[in-house]
Amino acid sequence: MAVQVLSFAYMLYNIQIMDYRTTADMPSFIRFPSRGSCSTGRVIALKCFECGTRAKLSRIIGGVEAAPGSWPWQVSLYYNNRHTCGGAIITSQWVLTAAHCVHDWAVYAGTVTHNPAKVAKQSVYAVEKIIYNKNYSHRSHDSDIALMKLRTPFNFSDTIRPVCLPQYDHEFPGGTECWISGWGYTHPDNSKESIYAPVPLISTKKCNSSCMYNGEVTPRMLCAGYAEGKVDACQGDSGGPLVCQDDNVWRLVGIVSWGTGCAEPNHPGVYTKVAELATCS
């Protein structure tokens, strides 16, 4: 990321991720649990967790470095023992990320650091199956989305929680303040700590204008950032979440996908539009 300068209902939505190709013998779509209350008080980890909520945290002075639990759905995807991409927890055993990130990953959850001494103490989750959109285009970045199923489920806690999926019939307007988080490139002496930043959504019409991306943004993408640059996702943030608050819960509105440079004027970050690739049923 480039930056200059519980009595709750169990809210995991019944969705279908359509037209996906899988790395194992699986159907072309996968269903997630429908919304409902936890009558027994037990969901996998013997406790109900509402999606899109965070534990009560003290204020973070400066608003840059993330405290544990500040973005509990954020995960780090490791390949060859190195952080390469981000992802977002959507259920106890499923992570959503970018298709261009897919490899033989290990998933680290509940962490805000890549300090080797601290990472060694974190929970690592092996990936069992990967499902990616069959319409994904490496050239155009269209439909840049993938699902990863873990061999073992997450143990939900204050630092590991799922994010809510967007309501497919709800459009967040341009100007809505959303948030990005991750471990991407910030400067030559890159920090090993997770950081986060607010970015406003930009209308597709504006983002497709001749002074920005000149028609390259498809209906399955959205833009967020500032015309003057300064704040943006960058290398290493790919696959990570763009979340917006809605009715007091956080929803996964976008997945870090592509852009021209990092924090360049008139070239905001472009994200996979989750609502366009997940249909409620």
Image (cartoon, rainbow, N blue to C red):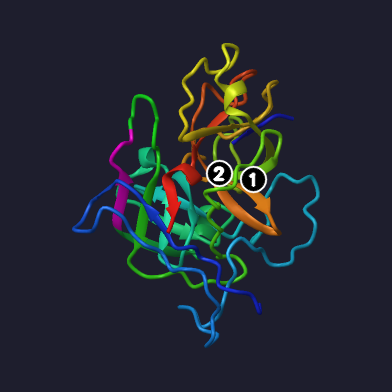
Judged left or right of residue 261, residue 105 is: left
Q: What amino acid is at disc 2?
A: Trp
In the rendered image, residue 231, in percent from the top left (x then y), is placed at: 67, 31
Q: Which residues are magenta?
A: 129-136
Q: Is residue 36 visible?
A: yes
Q: Is residue 6 magenta?
A: no
Q: Residue furthest bottom?
A: 40
In the rendered image, residue 26, in percent from the top left (x then y), is placed at: 23, 58
Label ID, residue 100 = none
Judged left or right of residue 27, residue 36 is: right
> Residues under labels 2 and 1: Cα distance?
6 Å
Q: Which residue, given by chain and number where applicable, does mark 2 sit on?
A: 183
Q: Is residue 135 magenta?
A: yes
Which secondary structure lies at badge 1? strand
Q: Which residue, given by chain and number where applicable, does mark 1 sit on?
A: 195
Q: Nearer the viewer, residue 127 or 172?
A: 172
